[in-house]
Image: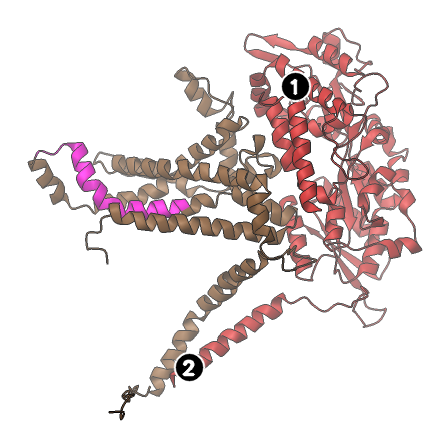
Amino acid sequence: MRKKSLFYAFSLLSISFILILTACTPQSRSASGTPTAVSGESEKVTLDFWTFWGSETRRPIIEKIIEDFNQSQDRITVKHTYLPFGDIWTKNLASIAAGNPADVIINDYADVNLRASKNQNTDLSTYLAENNIENRFYPELWKNVLYEDKAYALPFNTDTRLLYYNKKAFQEAGLDPEQPPQTWAELEEYAQKLDKKSANGYDQVGFYPLWGDFGVDSWLINGDNGNGYFNENNEAVINTPDKAYTLTWLKSWQDRLGKQTVDAMKADFGSGVSDPFISGKVAMYIQTGTYNTQIQEFGQDLDIGVAQIPEREAGSGHFSSGGGFVVEIPKGAKHPDEAWEFINYLTDVDAQKYWAIKNFDNVANIEAAEDPEANENAIYKASVDNLADTKVFQVPLSASGYKDLINPHMDAVFLGQETPEQALAAAEKDVQALIEKNK
Amino acid sequence: MTKTLRTPVPKIKRKKLSRLARREELQGYLFILPWLVGLFGITLFPMLFSLYGSFTDYDVTSRMNIVGLRNYVTLFTNDPLFWKSLYNTLYYVALMVPLTTIGSILLALMLNERIAGMRVFRTIYYLPAVLSGVGVYFLWIQLLNPSTGLINTLLGWIGIAGPAWLSDPMWTKPAIIMMKMWSVGGGMLLYLASLQGVPAQLYESAKLDGASAFRRFWHITLPMISPVIFFDVVTSFIGGFQIFQEGYVMTDSGNGGPMGSLLFYNLYMWNQAFKLFNMGYAMAMAWVLFVIVLILTLINLRMSKRWVYYEGGED
């Protein structure tokens, strides 16, 4: 009798297990990747589109773009799902593993190749063979959606960094507000003229290279002729004389202002009205093109100008750094054909133009980016022009996670624990070891 | 002689269960079924799965091939960040556990005094333990601001120039430990309850014998609350090894902070699992941590025999 009740208990247990497991089992999908729906053409397909654009500014823009698409035809309905930035990609991973992913998702440039190698996004080459839209994008961005020469995503937007400067501060310091610094030497000269020191420290700092949105990585690109940390053969080339020179130069700024000043001021920086450039604590500041919308919102009376990032010396190149987001079809999405139609639309001129005009965000579609209407805004135009000098790098697969190895050495330079040469040599050695390990 | 090598064991006849009893038995199983499903489905199965996964190159979406001990070998022989994150975590646990334990005992002793308005004080000191999560970390980022933060302002009053807490790798972990000290109220509550359970006659007779306040504390209070101390130490040990959020929230995009000084073990594990998709590797890391915590807890249990006093005896 006891056996019997145990049997009951176990059968109940196994039933509940089976229930749990079936809930997790991927729904069937056809091997060819075509939609499994067999109910005929008349059935309307609903696509789930995941973005992290939930802000008051961006949400209406992307939803208008989706709405326009839904209106334009009667076969596909796109549904927008907003997920917070911190969650969206872990959710994406989990849903791909569960076989029930979104149909289209906004994702990062930097790891398109990593996701492709892990079977997380869909190879678009068959669609591109029929309808080659490669030429609508900036080549620098297109490089980043490739994995083994096949595209696994389409570029959506991008960004680039510019030098913003406060014209009023320039005038006060006796500088010509129409002549922003062009070289590092000029930048230093201007910065020192713009510094305003008082008894308790600085009331205004002319410039500090690592405040704002242009980190050590970006400066190393700017100072090393536009080269990143890896060459075409995906070898680490970190310890170069030009990078050492750049790092030494960056450190000299900290030495001049004092590490304490730099740390203390940085800790006070906020956003909006307490943004250091908007509140007048810093006279020159490197930021992305969309930073201008913040200035317009919080610092209406600021008279500002923008310039390209100063070059190491005349002729070495005003290299800037960029990033941004792609649209891709997660692997296992149920309606890849319709999803392709939608991402084709998302990256086409109309949608891209609308995004650019409403956001002043840089878009990946060249024709839309250079559209005269959006370019009436001088700062937006400057950011579009700047794309020609902007570098966007794909991380070699064998070096995934390399930043955790490089950053501590860069920190060590600014803490005075390693010289620039030591830091770059050690970083190169660590990254080479990582690449060797991942081979 | 050879008659009975086997003596027949008398069959113990189980009393036949009545219908009602059977029904009740079944109901019993039904009642614990949700828990059983939880244990097997949500705890045991994932644990065993991760044990299996730790011997594979599992990356969630494309592969799961057995690679033997490779993940473990790489961890110990070819991963500087593994050692760094382990060091950061051990450093944190080694300081946090004794400091919060001593802190909450001292606080409980003070809050055990009989003075007017004690309930208010107890509430005030307990409050931080109720607050948790990301909001608290942002609050502390402001408190730890080197120039305008409250901590350095207070230090300035007594003539100490406070460090750049969250940007100087020497001070990042102490800053996090200090933040943890702020919420010792939870442990304090346990100690307070156990302090109030110490029989008053023990103190009375010690007083009659002329024992000083310190001796009374050392020879009566401490032994009497030692089971709670033990419990607190073991749980904060285990909790300490799980530190993750602090490193994730209080650094730029969870990059581990200045010179990787806040790259805690679980943060690195998370990066491996969800940023680099090396899930098998991360699973191996989880098991290494499990074994480390298990060993330390066993040592704790063994050592406890020397200093934990149970009034009613061991069992």
* A326 displayed left or right of B112: right
Mark 1 Cα within 10 Å, few/some/many (few <14, many 20+)? many
Q: Colour of chain B?
A: brown
Label 2: how many Cα within 10 Å (few below 14, some 14–19, many 20+)? some
Residue A61 horizontal/vertical position (percent) = 76, 43
- Pick out the residue farthest to the front: B1
Query: In this figure, which residue is indicated by the disc labeled 1?
Result: A251
Residue B264's place in the image compared with A216, above or below, is below
Colour chain A appears in: red
Q: Quadrant of the N terminus of chain A?
A: bottom left
- The x and y percentages for residue A144 are 80, 42
- Based on the displayed image, in which of its 4 quarters is residue A389 positioned? top right
Q: How far apart are labels 1 and 2 at the CA level?
A: 75 Å
Find residue A404 and report its image quarter. top right
Q: Which mark is residue A5?
A: 2
**Amino acid at dot 2:** Ser
In this view of the protein, which residue sits in the foreground, A132 or B62?
B62
